[in-house]
Amino acid sequence: MRFTTTLRRGATTAAVATAALLASAVPAAAAAPSTPVFGTTIDAYAAYDPQNTCDPVAKPGVIGFRELALRQYPSTGDSGIVRSCTGDTEVTEHKEGRAWDWTINAGNTADHARADELLAWLLATDSRGNQHANARRLGIMYIIFDHRIWGSYQAGDGWRTYTGSNPHTDHVHFSFSRAGAAKQTTWWTQVDQPAAWPRTERGANGANVQVLQHLLNAAGQSITVDGDFGPATETAVKAFQSANGATADGIVGMVTWSKLLKQVSRGSQGSAVKAAQVALNKGGAGLTVDGDFGSGTQAAVNAYQSAHDRTAGGVVDPTLWQLLIAGIA
C-alpha cells in the first residue's frame, strides 16, 4: 500500500459524522460484530505514526482484528499482515506487522456491502457519545478502501479521496497504532476478548475435538463423536473444507472453525446444540449432552455470558462460540 495522501499529524476530536461508503449498497449477509460492554474510559484518536523500522512479525492486535473480521464474514479473505522490508523503499506498516489487508472486491455489490457494514461499525458513535468508538478502542490509525481514506489523526474530515497508485478496490487496508497492534488499547484490556482459535488437527483429543465432531455432523458429515481426531475425523474435515471454499488440509484453524459455526438458541435441536453443550461443560456447566436447547442450556449460556461482560441473551453466537472453544473459563 503506497500512502500518498497528504497527512496531518495529531489526533482530532472534531464532531463530524461519517457517512456510509455506498448508500445504495445491499445489506450484508451477516450482521456487524457485536460490541462488548465497556467502561467510561476510551482511547484517544491514534496519531499518525508511520513505519520506521523493519520488524515483519504479525502483531497480536492485528491478528485479533483479522480473526474478528473473518469470523464475522467467513466468505471474505485474508491478503496478509506482513511484508518483507527488502526489495522496495515504500513506507508501510506491513513491514512492522501492524497492518492488515482484508480481501474484498469493491466491484461486487455484496462484498462492498460487507465492507460498508464493518467500516460503519468501526466508525459509529457509541452509547456514551464517543465518535468512531470501536476504531479508537482497537487503535486503528487509518483505513483505505475503494479510492477513499479515513484517518484517526484527521477524523474530523471523515472519508477523503485517496489518490495513491493503488486504488484499494480488491482489499481494505487497515493500519494500527503501536498500542493497538500490541493489544494495549481498551478493546483488549477492558473486557474479556476471544483468544485465538485453537489449531486442531490429527492426533488431538478431548472436548474441543468432540465439539468439532458434533459441528461436522451438524454440517452433514456422519462421524462417531469420541473426542479422538483420527483418520475418519480428518477425512470429514477435508470434505467440509473442500465443500466450503477452505484449504482442504485437514487442519481446523480460524477459517474452518468460523465456517463450521451455527448460531443456536432456546428451541434449537441437533448436533450443533450438542457441540455447544460440550463446550459449556468445559467450564463446568454439567449439562446433559442431548442436543435439546432447553431451559438448562439457556441458563448455562446466560451465566457464561454474564461472567464475560456480555448481554445475557441466551444465544450462542460466533463470539460466544470462540470464547467457549478457546477455553476461556
Image (cartoon, rainbow, N blue to C red):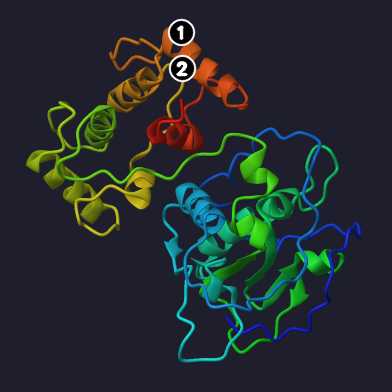
In this rendering, the answer to whether 103 lies above or below 89 is: above
Expressed as whole percent of the image width and height from the top left, the position of residue 20 reads 72, 60
> Can I make out residue 158 in this image?
no
Q: Judge from the rendering whether residue 166 lies leftward or rightward of residue 261; answer left or right.
A: right
Viewer-nearest residue: 15 or 146: 15
Q: Which residue is mark 1?
A: 295
Expressed as whole percent of the image width and height from the top left, the position of residue 138 reads 66, 52
- SS at circle 1: helix
Expressed as whole percent of the image width and height from the top left, the position of residue 79 reads 45, 69
Instruction: Name the disc covering residue 266, or none.
Output: 2
Expressed as whole percent of the image width and height from the top left, the position of residue 106 reads 55, 71
Image-quadrant location for residue 307:
top right
In this rendering, the answer to whether 125 lies above or below 323 is: below
> Can I make out residue 96 in this image?
yes
Label 2 to label 1, Cα distance in Å? 7 Å
What residue do we see at 61% from left, 89% from top? 165
- Label located before the other in sequence (2 or 1): 2
Q: Within 10 angstroms of label 1, few (less than 14), some, or many (20 or more) residues?
A: few
What residue do we see at 45% from left, 60% from top? 76
State yes or no: discs 2 and 1 in contact (Cβ < 8 Å): yes
Q: Judge from the rendering whether residue 106 lies leftward or rightward of residue 143; answer left or right.
A: left
Q: Residue furthest right?
A: 14
Q: Residue furthest left?
A: 231
What residue do we see at 79% from left, 79% from top? 7
- So how many labels did they put on this image? 2
User: In the image, what residue type sits under mark 2?
Assistant: Arg
- SS at circle 2: loop
User: In the image, what residue type sits under mark 1?
Assistant: Ser
